Image: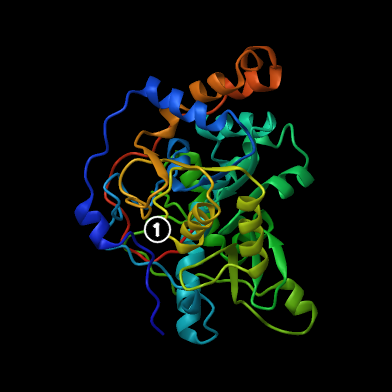
Amino acid sequence: MRVSVPTIPAALLRSATATQTISPAAAVDRIAAFLAPGNVAVVTGAGVSVDSGIRAYRGDKGRYLNPNYKPIFYHELMDSTERGASFRRRYWLRSYLGYPPVRDTLPNTTHFALAALQYASTVNRLVTQNVDGLHHKAIAHVWSDAQMQQRILELHGTLHKVHCSRGHATDRDTFQDYLSRANPQWKAFADELEESGRQPRTNPDGDVVLEGVRYDDFVVPDCPSCLAEHYRNSVQKPEVIFFGESISKETKDRSFEDIECCDRLFLLGTTLATFSAFRLLKHALELKKPVLLLNLGPTRADGLPGIDKIELASGTIMRDVVRAVLGSVASTDPVVQHMLQSGIVKPPPEDDDDIAPRATG
C-alpha cells in the first residue's frame, strides 16, 4: 500500500517569495474590518497551538521542521499481525508518556481571543485541525457541551478518546490507567519524570521523543468491552485521523455545512497541506465567500485568486483584533474581559525534531 504524506507542493515552496511587510497595527485593522460583519467561519491549524507549547509540524518556510519526518500510517497501526502489534507498542509507549503534558496544556492568547469572538457571536463556526482540545478549554466555562458540539468541529479528531477496532470507545484518562496497570515499570518511569520535572520532547500529536528504548516489553491492553463479549482485541487507537485514514462522511459533510452557513472564512495558523482543510478553502472560494488567511510562511493556498493573506503570528495581534471588532463590549463585558486577560504564551524551545514514526495529529 502506498500512502503519501500531505505536503505543500514543491513548486509552491520553490516559488515562495516574501509577503509584503505589514505592521501589527495595520494587520489588526485589516483583520478587524474583515471580521466586523460577523457570521464568520474559522479554520485553525497547528500554528495556533504553538504558544501553548505544542510544536507545529512545519516551520515558517512551509517545510516539515524535521526533514526525516516519518509518520505511522493508519494501515500500520491497525494491522492485526505481529508487525502491527509492534507499531502499536511503539506508538502507545510514546503516547503514554506524551499524553499527560498535552492533556494539561493550557489555551493561549489566540485560543481565548477566538473564544471571545465565538462568545460574542462574531464567529459562528470553528473548524480545527488540531487534536489538543484547546479551543474547547478556552470556552468551556461559558458554553455548554451542546453549544461546543454544535459550533466547534474537530476535523481530525481528538486525543482525548480512544477506540478499538470493533468500535468500543474509552475516555483517554481511563485508557491511561489501563496502560499504567499493564506496564508498572513504565508507570514508575512516568512518575519519576513528573516528580523531577524532566519531560521528554513532546510532539504535536501527543507522543514523545525516546532514544535508545526497546518497545518489545510494552503491553497494549485488550479492550475491556471486547473481553466482556469473549473476544480478545488489543487493536486500539486514539480518535485522531492518521495518515492514510479518511475522515468520516459525517465529519466531511459537517465541515462543508459550517462553511456554507457562514458569510466569510478566516483561516489561522495553517499551511492547508492536508486536503481535508484545503478543500474547505476551495469550497468557500467556489461559493464566492471572502477569505482571509493569517499564517507565517508558505501555504498550499498561495497564489490562488480571491485570498487575502497576512504573514504574522496570531498571538501577536488577535487580542487587539478582538478589541477592535467588539469595541466597548471588550471593556464592559466581564466574560470578554476575562478572556482577553487569559492565555499563556509558552512556545516550545527550538531544537531538532523527532525522527521516529508518529501519527498526523
Give residue 230's position: percent from left, percent from top. Answer: 77, 84
Mark 1 crowd level (few <14, some 14–19, many ≥20, 10 Å Cα): some
Its colouring scheme is rainbow
Of residue 84 and residue 299, the one placed in the foreground of this image is: 299
Give residue 92's position: percent from left, percent from top. Answer: 51, 65
- What is the quadrant of residue 326 in the picture? top right
Q: Residue at x 64, y 38 (%)?
A: 39
Q: Residue at x 46, y 46 (%)?
A: 193
Give residue 217's position: percent from left, percent from top. Answer: 48, 72
- What is the quadrant of residue 180 in the picture? bottom right
Of residue 141 and residue 201, the one placed in the foreground of this image is: 141
Position of 206 with respect to 229 (left or right) is left
Query: What secondary structure is found at the residue carrying circle 1?
Result: loop
Q: Residue at x 45, y 47 (%)?
A: 46
Give residue 45's position: percent from left, percent from top. Answer: 47, 48
Position of 34 with respect to 309 (left or right) is right
Q: Residue at x 39, y 67 (%)?
A: 71
Residue 108 seen in this snapshot: no
Residue 126, relative to residue 173: is it above or below? Answer: above
Q: Quadrant of the N terminus?
A: bottom left
Q: Residue furthest front?
A: 288
**How many numbered marks does the figure carry?**
1
Residue 276 seen in this snapshot: yes
Position of 25 with respect to 162 (left or right) is left
Residue of label 1? 273
Q: Amino acid at mark 1?
A: Ala
